[in-house]
Image: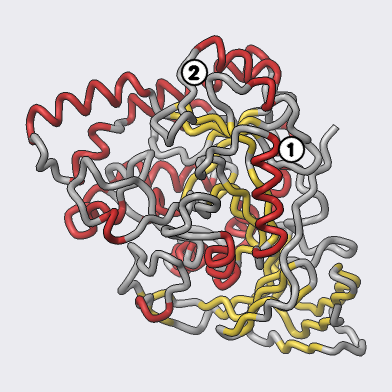
Amino acid sequence: MKKILITNANIVNEGAIVAGDVLIKDGLIERIEKSLAADAEIIIDAKGKYLIPGVIDDQVHFREPGLTHKANIYSESRAAIAGGITSFMEMPNTVPNTLTQELLEEKYQIAARNSIANYSFFMGASNDNIEEVVRTNKSNVCGIKVFMGSSTGNMLVDDEKTLESIFKNAGMLVATHCEDEKIIRENVEIYKAIYGDEAPTAVHPEIRNEDACYRSSSMAVGLAKRYDTRLHILHISTAKELSLFRNDIPLKEKRITAEVCVHHLWFDKNDYYGLGNLIKWNPAVKEAKHKQALMKALLDDRLDIIATDHAPHTLAEKNTNYWKAPSGAPVVQHSLNVMLEFYKERKISLEKIVEKMCHAPADCFQISKRGYIREGYQADLVLVDLNSSYQVHKSNLLYHCDWSPLEGQTFHSKITHTIVSGHLAYEHGRFHEERMGMRLEFERE
């Protein structure tokens, strides 16, 4: 691998911003010093730019295998790299659902051939695969995913005894999608009676409401406390759920953690009137008061991680009526831009963005030697220019689905370079695909 020297960078790492140089050799960060004199095949002058650890996204849907008309691991990992995401953890609701160890390993093989970013995949849980779940290797698999709400195929886990068995026997991190199916079904009937087939997308947060989220999340927390399960609740979307989480102990001591997704911080219910199904997600984007509460909880550490829940669909699939349109949208190319826009608005510091997008995912999932700018760590690094603007257009999108709910948005920062496991994978809009990303490893007892 080529030796890389980054000079004159503003290094954002571990709660501080310091000027310095970074030398990368054999894929690792070899030296970090105020001023380095070293030979290197690649020298990057980062004067005026900010160097951060590569973003780790713990929740994406890259749709392979089985749904590659929407996306695939190659296309979406390229979009992620362009957005400063160097590592991702992908969900099991592909086709077939990832419910056996053999199917799980097949996804790893696809990523080894095609992923530009580093990768890990969740093992899926269903109502009848506990034997497969407990076979999961906690040293090289990010976690067990449990859908406690509407999902795809056989992925909805709604049997109470099965849930208890998973929480009791998983033996590793369990990540949950929490929405109460009974409340959702009751609300669907109410709104179908009102609107028939012509419901506006703005009813989505009324159907998948605060109570549906809280009832399911509180159940998950109760099970985790009963069985001392390492629980991570995905995409918190309501103010009410925030009471379930602690900020009085360090992240590394928490047994129950939670994340917020960028779209729940960026959009609110008013945006349905212009964007409709393009911002239909599960859990739903809700009223503005919720995104304000989520930002506050992110800053005071009740929420631990910022993620995307990147979930592409084709425009044809989205451009149907509300009841038929699938939930989810593409986000990975712009999630860091969104958070940097909040920084520009003085809502969050650069140090906090790095903590929640880089350090915290590494700590939460116990990823080996990633998520920080430290000597001896894997060189996952991103250079950001905070003084360069661009507008999101269809022409500069990298998603296979070829659309974004952020089209037309002007961002006032750019990701200029992305280094993945010591390889310069992206610079100024150009990709270098001579090397693929690496499988994430985890340091767990």
| Quadrant showing the C terminus | top right
Q: Kindly tell me whether residue 116 is visible in this rendering.
A: yes
Is 258 placed left or right of 436 in the picture? left
Counting from the top left corner in percent of width and height, residue 377 is at 84, 61
The kind of residue on which mark 2 rests is: Met
Counting from the top left corner in percent of width and height, residue 135 is at 75, 28
Is 418 placed left or right of 261 in the picture? right
Neighbour class for label 1 at 10 Å: few (<14), some, many (≥20)?
few
Colouring chosen for the image of the structure: secondary structure
**Within the image, what quadrant is residue 88 found in?**
bottom right
**Within the image, what quadrant is residue 50 found in?**
bottom right
Q: Secondary structure at mark 2?
A: helix
Residue located 66% across and 67% down the image: 116
Disc number placed over residue 252 in the picture, else none: 1
- The residue at which mark 2 appears reads as 219
Q: Is residue 279 above or below residue 42?
A: above
- Label 2 – label 1 distance at C-alpha: 23 Å
Q: Is residue 248 above or below residue 273?
A: above
Q: Kindly tell me whether residue 303 is visible in this rendering.
A: no
Front-most of residues 417 and 31: 417
